Amino acid sequence: MRDVIDRILVSEEEIVKRSSELGKQISDDYRKTNETPLVVALLKGSVPFLAELIKHIDLDIQFDFMDVSSYQGTESIGDIRIDKDLDCSVKGLSILLVEDIVDTGRTLKEVTKLLMNKGAKDVKVVSLLDKPDRRVVEIEADYVGFEIPNEFVVGFGLDYDQKYRNLPYIGVLKPEVYK
Ligand SMILES: O=P(O)(O)OC[C@H]1O[C@H](OP(=O)(O)OP(=O)(O)O)[C@H](O)[C@@H]1O
Ligand code: HPA
Protein backbone atom coordinates (compact mmCIF):
# COMPACT_ATOMS: atom_id res chain seq x y z
CA MET A 1 0.00 0.00 0.00
CA ARG A 2 2.86 2.38 0.81
CA ASP A 3 3.99 2.33 -2.84
CA VAL A 4 1.14 4.77 -3.66
CA ILE A 5 2.95 7.49 -1.70
CA ASP A 6 5.20 9.91 -3.56
CA ARG A 7 6.74 11.36 -0.39
CA ILE A 8 6.00 11.68 3.30
CA LEU A 9 4.94 15.21 4.22
CA VAL A 10 4.41 14.74 7.97
CA SER A 11 5.89 11.76 9.79
CA GLU A 12 4.19 9.73 12.51
CA GLU A 13 6.68 11.08 15.07
CA GLU A 14 5.89 14.67 14.10
CA ILE A 15 2.13 14.03 14.38
CA VAL A 16 2.49 12.47 17.84
CA LYS A 17 4.70 15.36 19.05
CA ARG A 18 2.43 18.07 17.63
CA SER A 19 -0.73 16.38 19.00
CA SER A 20 0.83 16.44 22.44
CA GLU A 21 1.65 20.16 22.10
CA LEU A 22 -1.88 20.93 20.88
CA GLY A 23 -3.46 18.89 23.69
CA LYS A 24 -1.47 20.79 26.30
CA GLN A 25 -2.29 24.17 24.74
CA ILE A 26 -6.00 23.31 24.52
CA SER A 27 -6.02 22.13 28.16
CA ASP A 28 -4.33 25.36 29.31
CA ASP A 29 -6.67 27.59 27.30
CA TYR A 30 -9.90 25.95 28.52
CA ARG A 31 -8.63 25.81 32.10
CA LYS A 32 -8.11 29.59 32.03
CA THR A 33 -11.78 30.11 31.11
CA ASN A 34 -13.09 27.43 33.49
CA GLU A 35 -14.76 25.67 30.56
CA THR A 36 -14.81 21.98 29.71
CA PRO A 37 -15.55 21.41 26.05
CA LEU A 38 -17.64 18.71 24.44
CA VAL A 39 -15.24 17.31 21.85
CA VAL A 40 -17.03 16.74 18.53
CA ALA A 41 -15.20 14.76 15.87
CA LEU A 42 -16.26 14.72 12.23
CA LEU A 43 -16.33 11.22 10.75
CA LYS A 44 -14.44 9.59 9.34
CA GLY A 45 -11.15 11.37 8.68
CA SER A 46 -10.64 12.88 12.12
CA VAL A 47 -10.71 9.57 14.07
CA PRO A 48 -6.94 8.81 14.18
CA PHE A 49 -6.16 12.42 15.11
CA LEU A 50 -8.90 12.45 17.78
CA ALA A 51 -7.45 9.27 19.30
CA GLU A 52 -3.96 10.82 19.47
CA LEU A 53 -5.08 14.27 20.61
CA ILE A 54 -7.37 13.30 23.50
CA LYS A 55 -4.54 11.44 25.26
CA HIS A 56 -3.00 14.86 25.80
CA ILE A 57 -6.09 16.82 26.84
CA ASP A 58 -5.97 17.03 30.61
CA LEU A 59 -9.63 17.99 31.17
CA ASP A 60 -12.78 16.05 32.07
CA ILE A 61 -13.96 15.88 28.48
CA GLN A 62 -16.62 13.81 26.75
CA PHE A 63 -16.64 13.22 23.00
CA ASP A 64 -19.26 12.64 20.36
CA PHE A 65 -19.33 12.11 16.58
CA MET A 66 -21.02 13.68 13.60
CA ASP A 67 -20.94 12.69 9.95
CA VAL A 68 -21.84 15.24 7.30
CA SER A 69 -21.68 15.37 3.54
CA SER A 70 -22.29 17.92 0.88
CA TYR A 71 -25.55 18.05 -1.07
CA GLN A 72 -23.87 18.44 -4.44
CA GLY A 73 -20.33 17.07 -4.33
CA THR A 74 -17.18 18.46 -2.91
CA GLU A 75 -16.66 21.40 -5.24
CA SER A 76 -20.15 22.84 -4.98
CA ILE A 77 -21.20 22.38 -1.39
CA GLY A 78 -23.60 25.12 -0.39
CA ASP A 79 -25.20 23.35 2.48
CA ILE A 80 -24.64 20.08 4.29
CA ARG A 81 -26.60 16.95 4.94
CA ILE A 82 -26.24 15.30 8.35
CA ASP A 83 -25.57 11.59 7.83
CA LYS A 84 -25.05 10.96 11.55
CA ASP A 85 -26.10 13.49 14.14
CA LEU A 86 -24.64 13.91 17.62
CA ASP A 87 -26.00 11.65 20.37
CA CYS A 88 -26.13 14.50 22.88
CA SER A 89 -27.46 18.05 22.93
CA VAL A 90 -25.00 20.91 22.46
CA LYS A 91 -27.25 23.54 24.08
CA GLY A 92 -25.16 25.90 26.18
CA LEU A 93 -21.97 23.90 25.65
CA SER A 94 -18.53 24.92 24.50
CA ILE A 95 -17.62 22.73 21.55
CA LEU A 96 -14.16 21.70 20.42
CA LEU A 97 -14.59 20.50 16.85
CA VAL A 98 -11.91 18.06 15.65
CA GLU A 99 -11.06 17.96 11.95
CA ASP A 100 -8.40 16.20 9.91
CA ILE A 101 -8.07 18.95 7.30
CA VAL A 102 -9.38 22.43 6.49
CA ASP A 103 -9.32 22.69 2.71
CA THR A 104 -11.92 24.99 1.07
CA GLY A 105 -13.23 25.65 4.58
CA ARG A 106 -16.83 24.94 3.56
CA THR A 107 -17.34 21.94 5.85
CA LEU A 108 -16.02 23.84 8.84
CA LYS A 109 -18.10 26.92 8.12
CA GLU A 110 -21.33 24.93 7.70
CA VAL A 111 -20.78 22.68 10.72
CA THR A 112 -19.84 25.62 12.96
CA LYS A 113 -23.02 27.43 11.85
CA LEU A 114 -25.07 24.28 12.46
CA LEU A 115 -23.71 23.81 15.99
CA MET A 116 -24.33 27.47 16.85
CA ASN A 117 -27.89 27.14 15.50
CA LYS A 118 -28.37 24.12 17.76
CA GLY A 119 -27.56 26.36 20.72
CA ALA A 120 -23.85 25.79 21.33
CA LYS A 121 -22.29 28.53 23.42
CA ASP A 122 -19.03 28.57 21.55
CA VAL A 123 -17.28 26.52 18.83
CA LYS A 124 -13.53 26.22 18.61
CA VAL A 125 -11.77 24.13 15.99
CA VAL A 126 -8.65 22.00 16.07
CA SER A 127 -7.44 20.60 12.75
CA LEU A 128 -4.49 18.35 12.12
CA LEU A 129 -3.87 19.94 8.70
CA ASP A 130 -4.55 23.30 7.08
CA LYS A 131 -4.32 23.84 3.31
CA PRO A 132 -4.75 27.63 3.13
CA ASP A 133 -4.14 27.89 -0.65
CA ARG A 134 -7.43 26.07 -1.28
CA ARG A 135 -9.63 28.28 0.92
CA VAL A 136 -12.81 29.67 -0.66
CA VAL A 137 -14.64 30.77 2.49
CA GLU A 138 -13.22 32.89 5.24
CA ILE A 139 -12.64 30.59 8.20
CA GLU A 140 -9.64 29.53 10.25
CA ALA A 141 -9.13 26.77 12.79
CA ASP A 142 -8.21 27.95 16.29
CA TYR A 143 -5.55 25.25 16.59
CA VAL A 144 -3.64 23.82 13.62
CA GLY A 145 -1.20 20.93 13.59
CA PHE A 146 0.52 21.55 10.26
CA GLU A 147 0.08 23.95 7.38
CA ILE A 148 0.56 22.05 4.12
CA PRO A 149 0.93 23.02 0.45
CA ASN A 150 -1.79 22.51 -2.13
CA GLU A 151 -1.22 18.82 -2.78
CA PHE A 152 -3.56 15.88 -2.34
CA VAL A 153 -2.59 14.00 0.80
CA VAL A 154 -3.63 10.74 2.41
CA GLY A 155 -2.96 8.89 5.64
CA PHE A 156 -3.63 9.34 9.35
CA GLY A 157 -7.37 9.37 8.58
CA LEU A 158 -7.30 11.10 5.22
CA ASP A 159 -8.48 9.06 2.27
CA TYR A 160 -8.52 8.79 -1.47
CA ASP A 161 -11.70 6.95 -2.48
CA GLN A 162 -12.02 5.70 1.14
CA LYS A 163 -8.54 4.12 0.99
CA TYR A 164 -5.19 4.79 2.70
CA ARG A 165 -6.72 6.19 5.93
CA ASN A 166 -4.65 3.68 7.94
CA LEU A 167 -1.25 4.93 6.81
CA PRO A 168 0.52 6.13 9.98
CA TYR A 169 1.79 9.36 8.37
CA ILE A 170 0.60 12.11 6.00
CA GLY A 171 1.84 11.44 2.49
CA VAL A 172 1.43 12.97 -0.95
CA LEU A 173 -0.37 10.54 -3.23
CA LYS A 174 1.37 9.66 -6.52
CA PRO A 175 -0.59 11.47 -9.26
CA GLU A 176 -0.88 8.25 -11.31
CA VAL A 177 -3.06 6.77 -8.54
CA TYR A 178 -5.89 9.23 -9.19
CA LYS A 179 -5.34 10.01 -12.89
O1 LIG B 1 -12.55 22.26 3.86
P1 LIG B 1 -13.33 21.37 2.97
O2 LIG B 1 -13.09 21.64 1.51
O3 LIG B 1 -14.80 21.36 3.30
O4 LIG B 1 -12.77 19.90 3.13
C1 LIG B 1 -12.44 19.30 4.35
C2 LIG B 1 -13.36 18.16 4.66
O5 LIG B 1 -13.28 17.17 3.63
C3 LIG B 1 -12.99 15.90 4.21
O6 LIG B 1 -14.15 15.22 4.58
P2 LIG B 1 -14.95 14.16 3.70
O7 LIG B 1 -16.30 14.78 3.37
O8 LIG B 1 -14.12 13.71 2.54
O9 LIG B 1 -15.24 13.00 4.72
P3 LIG B 1 -14.27 11.96 5.46
O10 LIG B 1 -13.80 12.64 6.73
O11 LIG B 1 -15.16 10.79 5.75
O12 LIG B 1 -13.12 11.62 4.53
C4 LIG B 1 -12.23 16.25 5.47
O13 LIG B 1 -12.32 15.22 6.42
C5 LIG B 1 -12.91 17.52 5.95
O14 LIG B 1 -14.03 17.24 6.77
O1 HPA C 1 -5.81 16.52 0.49
C1 HPA C 1 -6.83 15.89 0.86
N1 HPA C 1 -6.80 14.54 1.04
C2 HPA C 1 -7.87 13.82 1.45
N2 HPA C 1 -9.05 14.37 1.70
C3 HPA C 1 -9.16 15.71 1.55
N3 HPA C 1 -10.25 16.51 1.75
C4 HPA C 1 -9.86 17.73 1.49
N4 HPA C 1 -8.55 17.79 1.12
C5 HPA C 1 -8.09 16.50 1.14
Image (cartoon, rainbow, N blue to C red):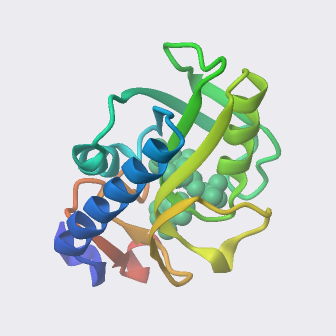
In the displayed structure image, the side of residue 119 where residue 125 appears, left or right: left
Asked if residue 91 shows in the view, the reply is yes
User: Camera-side residue: 107 or 165?
Assistant: 107
Task: Name the residue located 76 percent from the left edge and 48 percent from the top edge.
Answer: 77
Residue 48 on image: x %, y %: 28, 48
Task: Name the residue located 59 percent from the left edge and 34 percent from the top edge.
Answer: 68
- Residue 74 vertical placement versus 130 (above, below): above
The tally of labels here is 0
- The image quadrant that residue 156 belongs to is bottom left
Residue 1 on image: x %, y %: 18, 66
In the displayed structure image, the side of residue 52 where residue 91 appears, left or right: right
Task: Name the residue located 74 percent from the left edge and 42 percent from the top edge.
Answer: 110
- The image quadrant that residue 41 belongs to is top left
In the displayed structure image, the side of residue 51 where residue 111 appears, left or right: right
Residue 123 on image: x %, y %: 63, 40
- The image quadrant that residue 78 belongs to is top right
In the displayed structure image, the side of residue 92 where residue 35 appears, left or right: left
Residue 143 on image: x %, y %: 50, 61
- Residue 20 vertical placement versus 60 (above, below): below
Asked if residue 38 shows in the view, the reply is no
Task: Name the residue located 48 percent from the left edge and 74 percent from the top edge.
Answer: 152
Outermost residue to the right: 78
User: Camera-side residue: 124 or 133?
Assistant: 124
User: Camera-side residue: 173 or 26?
Assistant: 26
